[in-house]
Amino acid sequence: MKLTCSKFEQILKSGRLALTAEIGPPKHTSPEGVISNARLLKDCVDAANVTDCQSAVVRMSSMAASLHILQNGLEPIFQVTCRDRNRIAIQSDLLGAYSLGIKNVLCLSGDHQVFGNHPTAKNVYDLDSVQLIQLTRRMRDEKLFFSGEAFKAYEPRFFVGAVANPFADPFEYRVDRLEKKINAGAEFIQTQCIYDMERFYRFMEMCTRRGLHERAYILAGVIPLKNWRAARYIQTKVPGMIVPEDIIRRLKDAEDPKAEGLDICVEQIQYIREQIKGISGFHIMAINWEEAVSGIIRRAGLCRSETPDKEKE
Amino acid sequence: MIIAEQKPLKEVADFIKDCNKVLVAGCGGCVTVCLSGGEKETEILASALRIKRRIEGKPLETVTYTATRQCDPEFIEAMESVVRDVDAVISLACGVGPQYLAERYQDKPVYPALNTKFAGGSRTHGVWEEYCGLCGDCILHRTGGICPVIRCPKSILNGPCGGSQNGKCEIGQEVDCVWQLIHDRLKRLGRLDLLKEIAPLKDWSKSRDGGPRRMTREDVMI
């Protein structure tokens, strides 16, 4: 298949374990934080997701923040949710983002606005994530707008990604839904953050049995925890998450909870690398703790110089 | 049916604070069934307004009338004699009623006593739930007879999203994940294959997005 110009795609295609991080745009107009995070992360990861008003909180647009990141040496993965824009606005943003040099797009439904700072807002959801994947691919491959109207020229050639949450229900349908996203055209998949290794193991076993890891690059998501309260928050307040009690206990008992959180994260990456088949990379989401990423990568043995070969299989 | 609930008394009383005589008009349709705007509720609202105004030292006169339906011009027409000498009309119908009244009685202020909520039915006595989004293009044949357009807060057509857990929706424990229900039902019917198809973009022009809707049937026109 014809490559896009995404470096992130080239790394995945080369068989090297890919690393991505996450950058959350600010709740103001200064790009300084985004820029300093881009500089901090550019030498340790291959690309960074730029969230689209995550948790339905108003932030600098994902497109603008993606451009700041791109201009500072890090390839952005432009996140697009279906919550706030209809099919006209989304396509307009896809054209605009591509014109700015953004090459990767991640298609999501988006958290419901009830979680954010404008819970009385009207939501859009004109289309859903599966439809967005399919139509963004069709835009690229068949040069068609979502309506079916043809492009004259300069179609956006995005590398198209999606998310999968192995910890949501119904569990037995989660692999089906991932397959549906891959059938729709998702080329890379980033999972929700993983704490329940047993469940993730079963999930990936089903994926590899169906050969899904050969049809899309699956990146395992991890989030380092700063303390037990953060773990409890994710366990109880973030939709569709599972955090086992023993992780909370380890953080509670630790003398230095931050160090313990990093240890847990490194152990998780090592476990996934060694025990779980079908993983093409890691998505390290350390929002507001970006400085932790390089240490995690080094300790997990994922530094660029140490992972030259194909690790799949 | 259309489910509606009464506005707080104070809000309704404020609408008519300058009136001396009002018509309180109930409706014999859906709002009678959902116990918010039938004959009984109309009498209770009229007497509550009178009591409030008497306490405030500015007595109010009320006339009550419950139309067979307020969504039918012939029943609105029949109200002419009671509308004539009041200062304003308070309608206990769904949002259709006040508009029909305003259209027919051009010089008369009309106020809504209800908030029209949704199309649905009763779950148990005293509990009503939304079932239909009135989207104009029914897809229940693909979803096991369970509507994701209105019962999923994101109207996802290829669900469930990543926020579904233990059968509940991410927006709250009191909301069932409708895609869990759809999945379970299709599984029972042996039709999980329906979920493998990518549901296409919805044609929202058949919903409110296409502008106010009108249905015409020449076969029943006179």
Image (cartoon, helix red, strand yellow):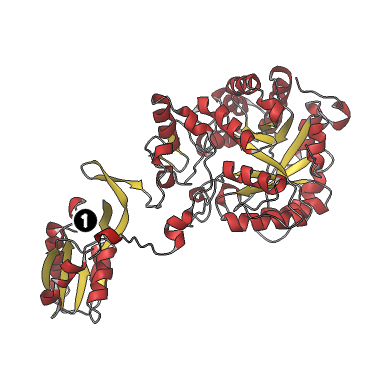
Q: Quadrant of the C terminus of chain B?
A: bottom left
Q: Which residue is pictured at 66% across the width and 21% down the height?
A: A208
Q: Secondary structure at mark 1?
A: helix
Place residue B173 in its image quadrant: top left
Q: Which residue is pictured at 68% across the width and 25% down the height?
A: A268
- Residue A15: give x, y in percent of width and height: 81, 28
Image position of B196 with respect to A43: above or below: above
> As drawn, which residue projects farthest toward the right?
A305
Tell me if mark 1 has few (under 14), some (14-19) or many (20+) residues whose alpha carbon lies within 10 angstroms of its own: many
Is residue A58 among the parts visible in the rendering?
Answer: no
Mark 1 sits on what residue?
B31
Q: Amino acid at mark 1?
A: Val
* A76 with respect to A147 (left or right): right
Place residue B146 in its image quadrant: top left
- Residue B136: give x, y in percent of width and height: 39, 52
Protein chain holding label 1: B
Q: How many marks?
A: 1
- Viewer-proximal residue, A2 or B163? A2
